[in-house]
Amino acid sequence: MTNKFSLPKSVSKYFWGDKLQDLNWPEHQDYIIQTILEKGNQETVSWVFSQLNKKELKVKLSQLKLSLKSKNFWSIYLS
């Protein structure tokens, strides 16, 4: 099966230890989101918001493996 999903270049730099061709949004979106919310910049976070709306992201937040600092920040930001 060919993976037609590709991360934008600005986002893919955060996944240097992963095989980018193996990452796909449906299967790995939690991993992709948590990496960007933890380490990303304004451009990459904007990309995440283009993939999910604020409400969807707020629901997912409790499932993500984020540092306490990041989880608190995003909880406030998304409220």
Image: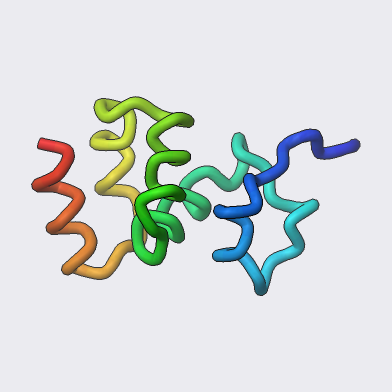
Q: Quadrant of the C terminus?
A: top left
The residue that appears at 63% across and 46% down in the rendered structure is: 8
**The image quarter in which residue 48 lies:** top left
**The image quarter in which residue 16 lies:** bottom right
Q: What is the x, y in percent for residue 56?
A: 32, 28
Q: What is the x, y in percent for residue 78?
A: 17, 38
Instruction: Describe residue 43's horizontal placement relative to residue 60 as left or right.
Output: right
Q: Quadrant of the N terminus?
A: top right
The residue that appears at 73% across and 56% down in the rendered structure is: 20
The residue that appears at 55% across and 65% down in the rendered structure is: 14
What is the residue that sits farthest to the right in this orientation? 1
Q: What is the x, y in percent for residue 19?
A: 76, 63
The residue that appears at 38% across and 34% down in the rendered structure is: 49
Q: What is the x, y in percent for residue 11?
A: 56, 53
What is the residue that sits farthest to the bottom in this orientation? 17
Q: Is residue 53 placed above or below 69 in the rendered structure?
A: above
Residue toward you, 64 or 32: 32
